[in-house]
Image (cartoon, rainbow, N blue to C red):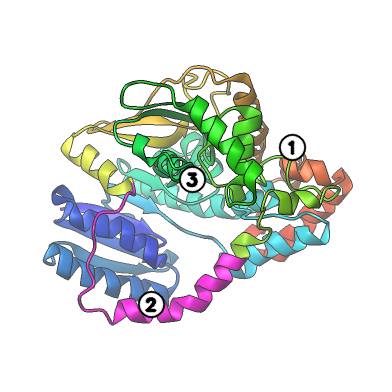
């Protein structure tokens, strides 16, 4: 029987989407699903909710089993064909709070802090050792499995897995498949969605809509640029940073404005506080979301747990479609995060983790050669890739000096702090993270 293992199954809503999709995919419905987590309560809740969906949407054809704690991890992975990763090491408390509050003492403000910035670096450094453990187990008990990584920081974690383990890995994000639809909705151009063609490539959370044409092959970018500039000039809205990218760089970016506001040295600047209001930048947005989610979860979980009619319809997530493509050898196209082997994007080093179109079939993931990007887009991406590669190096060496080097090259941090303050901040954050970062010396 096909086995699918979900690491971080206590992420109930996301597990419901991914594994609910599995139960709706005919080729995957009769499978074994291993749910792994280190939180007994959340694991039990996910099991109960998914069991209800399995009954209502899948006539109990899947077999679900829970595995709690590191001592049961190998059994959860044993014999798996697919492993979905959705862990968050350290949770909101203490780690996310540390990632925001200590930098704030040094005058460094963030919005999401899960991809780049000092928060993204620290999240990678405490997550990679855990994923290293996953990899060593997988190399022994399911060496042919495909690892589907959804955990951020995507490029750093996926890049590490692909460079320093033998696990077949692809990184997956939601932003590629909703990029054009969101843009068209913002600009009142949804009539252009049907039959459109697009090319998206770059790096995770900063991939670019390089080409976009309508069903007749007409270039839509001139009208997109005109409407986006007009919308930014007319007043505040929630996507102002990306529309400013469109104006200044010429291209639309896959990930939201609140994310991209902190991936560069342009918008969050202590000397120019007026930019926060001008570009509607939601500082401390991720902690705010966490607090609301934690506050609402008891009510949400009770409703889900008590709903005997709970079912599922197929979401837009890639995971089940990738599994189906591999399992049935039916080709499917995704936007995937992979190593830049063979210079898929000519402008970047081969060690970089890039987000490019990929074909999936019975032989696995086949990335597409993209070529060169417009120079300004490649330059923007490289400011992030530099930090990603240096963070991966720090995770490999376990040296604080290497962590500082990654922080020194991080665009937003470098624009705001002196090297001495960076060093003090790094030391303080490592100490505050305690056992999560005890391996760094």
Disc 1 marks which residue? Answer: 409
Q: Left or right: 164 with respect to 24?
A: right
Q: Nearer the viewer, mark 3 or mark 1?
A: 3
- Name the residue at 18% across, 34% down: 329
Magenta part of the protein: which range? 288-317
Q: Earlier in the sequence, mark 3 or mark 1?
A: 3
Q: Nearer the viewer, mark 3 or mark 2?
A: 3
* Residues at discs 3 and 1 in contact (Cβ within 8 Å): no
Q: Is residue 187 above or below residue 348?
A: below
Neighbour tally class for label 2: few under 14, some 14-19, many 20 plus, Cα within 10 Å: some
* Residues at discs 3 and 2 in contact (Cβ within 8 Å): no
Q: Nearer the viewer, mark 1 or mark 2?
A: 2
Q: CA distance from mark 3 to mark 2?
A: 32 Å
Number of the label disc, if any, that sits on residue 186: 3
Q: Is residue 22 magenta?
A: no
Q: Is label 3 in a helix, a strand or a loop?
A: helix
Number of the label disc, if any, that sits on residue 336: none
Q: Left or right: 404 with respect to 82?
A: right
Write down the quadrant of residue 173 in the picture. top left
Residue 260 visible somewhere in the drawing: no
Q: Is residue 45 above or below residue 140?
A: below
Q: CA distance from mark 1 to mark 2?
A: 42 Å
* Residues at discs 1 and 2 in contact (Cβ within 8 Å): no
Q: CA distance from mark 3 to mark 1?
A: 34 Å
Disc 2 marks which residue? Answer: 301
Q: List x then y, in percent, for residue 138.
A: 37, 48
Q: Earlier in the sequence, mark 1 or mark 2?
A: 2
Q: List x then y, in percent, for residue 389.
A: 62, 35
């Amino acid at each position: 029987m096909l086995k699918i293992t979900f690491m971080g199954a206590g992420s109930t809503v996301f597990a419901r989407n991914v594994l609910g999709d599995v139960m709706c995919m005919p080729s995957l419905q009769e499978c074994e699903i291993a749910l792994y987590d280190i939180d007994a309560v959340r694991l039990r809740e996910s099991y109960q909710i998914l069991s209800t969906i399995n009954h209502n949407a899948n006539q109990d054809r899947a077999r679900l089993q829970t595995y709690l704690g590191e001592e049961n991890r190998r059994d959860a992975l044993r014999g798996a064909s697919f492993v979905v990763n959705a862990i968050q090491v350290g949770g909101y408390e203490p780690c996310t709070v540390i990632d925001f509050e200590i930098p704030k003492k040094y005058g460094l403000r963030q919005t999401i802090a899960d991809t780049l910035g000092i928060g993204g670096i620290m999240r990678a450094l405490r997550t990679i050792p855990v994923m290293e453990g996953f990899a060593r187990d997988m190399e022994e008990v399911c060496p042919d499995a495909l690892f589907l990584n959804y955990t951020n920081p995507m490029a750093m974690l996926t890049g590490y897995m692909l460079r320093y383990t033998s696990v077949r890995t692809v990184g997956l994000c939601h932003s590629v498949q909703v990029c054009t639809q969101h843009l068209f909705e913002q600009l009142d151009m949804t009539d252009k969605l049907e039959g459109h063609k697009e090319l998206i490539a770059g790096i995770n959370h900063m991939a670019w809509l390089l080409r976009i044409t309508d069903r007749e092959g007409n270039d839509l970018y001139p009208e997109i640029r005109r409407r986006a500039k007009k919308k930014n000039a007319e007043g505040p809205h929630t996507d102002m940073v990306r529309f400013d990218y469109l104006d200044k760089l010429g291209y639309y970016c896959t990930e939201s404005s609140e994310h991209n506001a902190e991936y560069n040295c342009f918008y969050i600047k202590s000397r120019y506080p007026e930019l926060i209001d001008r570009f509607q930048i939601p500082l401390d947005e991720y902690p705010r979301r966490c607090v609301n989610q934690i506050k609402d979860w008891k009510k949400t979980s009770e409703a889900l747990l008590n709903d005997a009619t709970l079912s599922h319809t197929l979401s837009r997530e890639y995971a089940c479609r990738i599994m189906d493509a591999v399992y049935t050898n039916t080709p499917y196209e995704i936007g995937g995060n992979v190593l830049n082997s063979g210079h898929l994007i000519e402008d970047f080093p081969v060690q970089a983790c890039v987000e490019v179109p990929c074909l999936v079939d019975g032989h696995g993931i086949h990335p597409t050669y993209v070529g060169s990007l417009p120079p300004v887009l490649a330059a923007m991406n490289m400011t992030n890739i530099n930090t990603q590669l240096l963070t991966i190096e720090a995770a490999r060496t376990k040296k604080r000096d290497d962590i500082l080097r990654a922080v020194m090259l991080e665009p937003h941090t470098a624009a705001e702090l002196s090297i001495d303050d960076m060093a003090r901040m790094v030391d303080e954050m490592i100490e505050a993270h305690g056992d999560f970062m005890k391996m760094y010396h």
